[in-house]
Amino acid sequence: MLATDATPQLTWDLARDVHQLFEFHFMVNAFRAGTVVAVVAAAIGWFVVLRQQTFAGHTLSVVGFPGAAGAIWLGVSATYGYFAFCIAAALVIALVPRGRGRAFSEESAVIGTIQAFALACGFLFASLYSGFLNGIDSLLFGSFLGITDGQVLTLLVVGAGALAVLIVIGRPLLFASVDADVASARGIPVRVLSVVFLVVLGVAVAEASQITGSLLVFALLVVPAAAAQRITSRPVVGFVGAIGLGLVITWLGLGLSYYADYPVGFWTTTVAFAIFLGAEIASRATRAALAARRPSPTVVGP
Amino acid sequence: MNPGLHVGSLLATGSGIADLFAHPFVRNALLAGTAIAAASGLVGYFVVLRSQVFSGDALSHVAFAGALGALAFGIDARVGLFAATILVGLGLGVLGRGGRADDVVIGTVFTWILGLGVLFLSIYTTSSSTGNGAANVNVLFGSIFGLSSGEATLAAVIGGVLCVAVLAIARPLLFASIDEAVATARGVPVRVLGIVFLGLVGVCAGEATQAVGALLLVGLVAAPAGAAQRLTSRPWVGLGLAAGLAVLALWVGVLVSYVDGDIPPSFAIMAAATAMYLLAYGAGRVRAARGSREATVPVSRPVPADAA
């Protein structure tokens, strides 16, 4: 797969190329961090897509930007800024009642406003911290370069924590996401679950932001899950598939940006878009083929 | 204008509001900003009503890619800006089901377009030696004080035309947004309206990018409109209120930024718009609580069809 997307600088000897890729320690760390982020983001993103909270997920990732800019302005590590702002924003979103139907969506207006205001705050902090304007790019669009061993460890620990919480609440959350009314009638604390989920999402997004930049978290959060859910309707297969696709996006993106001289943000999003397009076409083709073979609607299964 | 007075007022910057209009950059900002804000308020009212804030968000990222793409190829940033936002707006309308685009599809497309923007940014910054290092920041966060008088006039004219266009389709669009099924039955071209409207949102996104930047335009579109819908349930009053609040936010923002030069105008405008939304939210809550105590049913917004 790597070879078909290859640029002229690459040889056809895959083993040699991969060896070359890992020659530098920063690249090894980039792959380690990217792998952790891809798994966590795709796993949580699968629920984000199921619960139709993609806009909220995007907002949380955007809110990391003023957090980081503010932290740098105050002289604190950007990491604390990311976590503080993402979790705070998750709680704010959780407090707003979820709208049903599409006729009027208070939620999206609130989220849009929070998002723009947060970005404006980030811009204010960046302006106040004079000489920092050039750093805006790496905060917004990320940099896979210069990731330290310590950062990889932090990402791993926090990511594992977020995944652990997700595994604990996974089954009831799935139930609540698919049918909130029935779930709450069965005694599942739907509201509490949704708050916990948003906080987990905030944590995951905060750590991912530190690698991919605030604006491109979405490519690893939503696209793998959306593509997987277009290919299969079975939860477990879709969940694992989303993680797999997330890894493919990250690894290909990193590899391509190493060999071709364009930013990793461009390659990651391009691979993600290609995968989504492929999944969309595949799912339409499958549906068309099924419809042609069996006129009556049937459940797709083994 | 007396040049001596102009220099004097420049030196006195921050001393008061009186000499505000003596500065060409402030006049340009207010001229363009008023038209842009009014258009954003009107468009935003429908964007919020139709739950298409996410489309506006997507267009904001398209604006970034379009402007930087034009810069990368050595064209005026505004050409790329409007071409990208209008094309993608129409595209979202055509692709989306019934003229309303699917959130996941929009998100995926805009993420990729944002990636393209990053590509153009890297081409622009590495290839052009004459490149403006702050162009990237200007596109992302706006530079309303940096508008030349020609740019401001053009922006004001486009903003005015956009206002007229939105008002022209307002009646059928309102009908189609509130009850699509009945509107279709009555012969309103719902699908075409949806596509045309998203095209207008594209124009609005291109306009707003010049005032508050690609990343902040959603605030100018969503916050005043959201506040207006909180305050009144009457559509025409709401439309006027949304436009009025947006213009007010822009003026307050420009004034604050003028008085304190450390505060970027984009931030001040966003802060004013957000404060309005918060106030309207609080007012709506208080009124709803009072209304329910009096055992009346205040219809503060269209009831979603599946809420029953």
Image (cartoon, coloured by chain):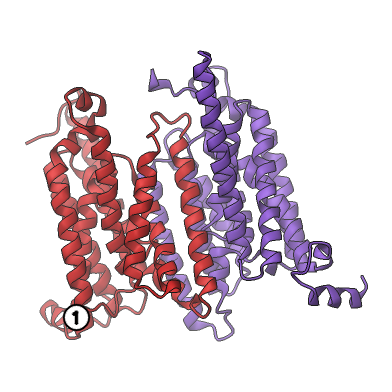
Give the letter of the chain under mark 1.
A
Relative to the observer, which residue lies in front, B156 or A20? B156
Q: Residue at x 40, y 32 (%)?
A: A99
Mark 1 Cα-neighbour bin, 10 Å: few <14, some 14–19, many ≥20: some
Rendered view: A165 above or below A260: above
Q: Residue at x 82, y 63 (%)?
A: B21
Label 1 sits on a secondary structure element that is: helix
What residue is shown with label 1? A21
Q: Residue B234, position in %: x, y? A: 63, 25
- Mark yes or no: residue A279 visible: no
Q: Name the image quarter holding residue B156.
A: bottom right
Q: Which chain is red?
A: A
User: In the rendered picture, chain B carries what hue?
Assistant: purple
A117 lies left or right of A3: right
Q: Residue A60, position in %: x, y? A: 37, 53
For the N terminus of chain B, which image quadrant? bottom right
A162 lies left or right of B65: left
